Image (cartoon, rainbow, N blue to C red):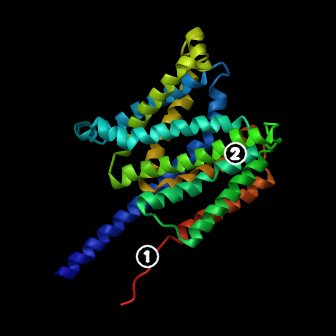
Amino acid sequence: MASTKQRGLKTTSSSEKEGTNKNVWIFSALLTLQYGAQPLISTRFTRREVIVTSLVLACEVAKVICAFVVLTINGSLTKVCKDWSFVNALAFSGLPAAIYAMQNSLLQISYKNLDSLTFSMLNQTKLFYTAFFGFLLLRQKQSIQQIGALFVLIIAAVLLSIGEGTSKGSKSKNPDEALLYGIIPVLIASVLSGLASALCQWASQVKKHSSYLMTIEMSFFGSVCLLASLSKSPAGDAMRRHGFFRGWTLLTLVPVMINAFGGILVGLVTTYAGGVRKGFVIVSALLVTALLQFIFDGKPPSPYCLVALLLVITSISIYQKYPYHIKKKKA
């Protein structure tokens, strides 16, 4: 009888694991498509005169609405509201939101002082910091093969950057300025990105904080930071002169809603798969963008892009095939 029960438990556990893996692949695939299609959709449905900050704020509001709708549909809204506390919101979502806001500011500073290729190469180091902080906070170890797969993925990202032909030399003529305002900020931003991603994963996987609730909280805290910056920013001046919805049409809602859908998927991928897997999604999305550009704009992918495609497929295969296994002690 005991062995029958054990077999039943193992079967249930195995089926649950298969279901989780299936969800991971579905969410990752959808997020890859969303990331890949977002640039083309935004270009086609957003006019140039639209104020970028208004678009970002609208996306955050849309994320909150989508998360509330999902919580209502799955019947967990009442429980989430009952268990919610402002202290937990600050601890689980406020800190990552503030870190991401600081990271975005540093990236803006760096991008103005580095050429695109150098920027892209340094920005990809966030994959290693994500794995590093995942080990520190979650004790998630990587096998030697998985570490090698991360290197391969970064090489693919660099090739994609070269394929875009964006390297035009440093934007800063002074080497000291390039180091101080270009290289150092992007490296700090990469560290912050890895830390924030690991904190989100810790909150969702260890503390069992709902990914939908975290989306709502992070959108709120992020919007507060953004609104606070409007008082002394060009975007704030433009809004006061021309209004929040300058240049908007009904079609502008298309990229807003798709971006909101992507925000929900980011939370789900982080919860089920972790921050490192999200890095694979982001690089894979660059290939989707190249494919869509070929389909809709007639722009064929460069040889660099084709090589990067093989590297991404190889990297994902290695990372999935050789997970870290705890060595059993000999009796």
Mark in front: 2 vs 1:
2
**Which residue matches tag 1?**
326
Q: Residue at x 69, y 45 (%)?
A: 183
* Amino acid under disc 1: Ile
Measured Cα–Cα span from mark 2 to mark 1 = 37 Å
Residue 183, numbered label = 2
Residue 214, numbered label = none
Q: Residue at x 65, y 48 (%)?
A: 123
In which quadrant of the rendered image does the C terminus lie?
A: bottom left
- Residue 260, given in percent of the width and then of the height, sits at 48, 35
Answer left or right for 290 relative to 202.
Answer: right
As drawn, 193 above or below 145: above
Q: Depth check: 276 or 8 in front?
A: 276
Could you tell which of marks 2 and 1 lies nearer the N-terminus? 2
As drawn, 24 above or below 217: below
* Amino acid under disc 2: Ile
Q: Depth check: 324 or 18 in front?
A: 324
Secondary structure, mark 1, is loop
Query: Residue lying furthest left in this view?
Result: 1
Instruction: Answer few, some or many: residues within 10 Å of disc 1's Cα (few below 14, many 20 plus, some between 14 and 19).
Output: few
Answer left or right for 43 relative to 91.
Answer: right
